[in-house]
Image (spheres, rainbow, N blue to C red):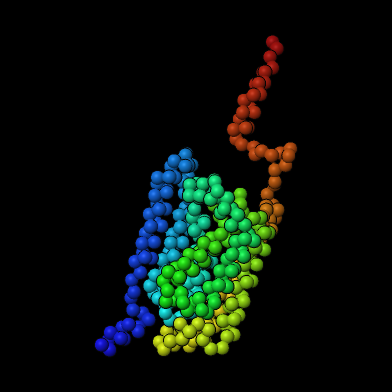
Amino acid sequence: MNAQIGDFASPWRFQAHPEVWLLVVFVIAAYIYAIRVIGPVAVKNEEIISARQRNAFIGAILLLWLSSDWPVHDLAEEYLYSVHMFQHMALSYFMPPLVLLAIPIWMFDAVFGSGRVRTVIDWLSRPVVAGVAFNIMVMITHIPTLVNQSVSNAPLHYSLHVLVVVTALLVWLPICGPDTSRHMKSGGKMIYLFLMSVVPTVPAAWLTFAEGAVYKQYDIAVRVWGLSVTTDQQIAGAVMKTGGAIFLWSIVVFLFFKRFTAGFSNQQSYRKQPTLEDDSVLTFEDVTDAFGRVPPAEEPSSKI
């Protein structure tokens, strides 16, 4: 009896999540089906999928599986709110851009078409609409009453996760979505991502400086790694603030250097740049062709 109680109370006991396995298998099967069946019809005599898109899909699937399966899922829902926060960060910040980078435009068109559904998607993915919706979800998912109920209510728990992922995908569509015509300019992307890193500082600061247990569901006797409730909340606040901010600001810095250093290496190069008068490169074939067009010189006749 004591052994059974000890096994049940162990944070590291294995718990199967077949719903997660089915979801991962379904997504992989759907992606492969689209590439092998729909791709050759939609894309003729062109590359169906690039190596970059394939690698992005692998990364997205790994993040989905690792953040939703044992042991991360069980630690996040039963023991540590800091792990719960990491789980949400993976599903809302790290996975969505990889999902969008993995989808070629022909696959996006095949799923959403060009009718009303596509119009709704385009409207929802407008920066202001998507940004407001996502940050509202961020604030809602930190309400103590809702968090405590979702931990013990599976339908509510999965519904919140779906809403977080969907709104996150809408946020990233104007940044790295398959339809490049809907992308913002580099300057707009930088401002947009910077603003997206500001709102999460509110619940992050609240968690960091809160006294006592904010979420009663995590105030339990079993403490993983010896972390107290207060320390667990402080780590969660740090993960939310620094993790999201560092990730978003890294993209901002990358976009900045990509935008403002374009052509810098060419400007600093000592190689001769082509001009309007001399915009071609002289090749060996050009030389031989020029000599071929010159008539041979006549030999002077000798006088007897």
Q: Please state if 285 lies on the left or on the right of 3 as rendered.
A: right
In the rendered image, the vertical position of residue 286 relative to residue 136, given as above or below: above
Q: Quadrant of the N terminus?
A: bottom left
In the rendered image, the vertical position of residue 14 relative to residue 123, given as above or below: below
Q: Position of residue 167 (x, y in %)?
A: 54, 63
Q: Position of residue 247 (x, y in %)?
A: 57, 68
The residue sitting at the left extreme is 1
Q: Please state if 128 lies on the left or on the right of 108 as rendered.
A: right
Seen from the viewer's position, the closer of residues 161 and 265 is 161
Classify residue 126 by image quadrant.
bottom right
Q: Please state if 124 lies on the left or on the right of 58 as rendered.
A: right
Q: Which residue is depicted at the point 52% across and 56% down? A: 101
Q: Which residue is depicted at the point 44% across and 65% down? A: 64
Residue 264 seen in the current view: yes
Classify residue 304 by image quadrant.
top right
Q: Position of residue 184 (x, y in %)?
A: 64, 55
Q: How many marks?
A: 0
Classify residue 75 by image quadrant.
bottom left
Seen from the viewer's position, the closer of residues 301 and 234 is 234
Seen from the viewer's position, the closer of residues 150 and 83 is 150
Q: Position of residue 211 (x, y in %)?
A: 56, 88
Seen from the viewer's position, the closer of residues 252 and 34 is 34
Residue 180 seen in the current view: no
Q: Which residue is depicted at the point 53% across and 89% down? A: 212
Q: Please state if 243 lies on the left or on the right of 293 as rendered.
A: left
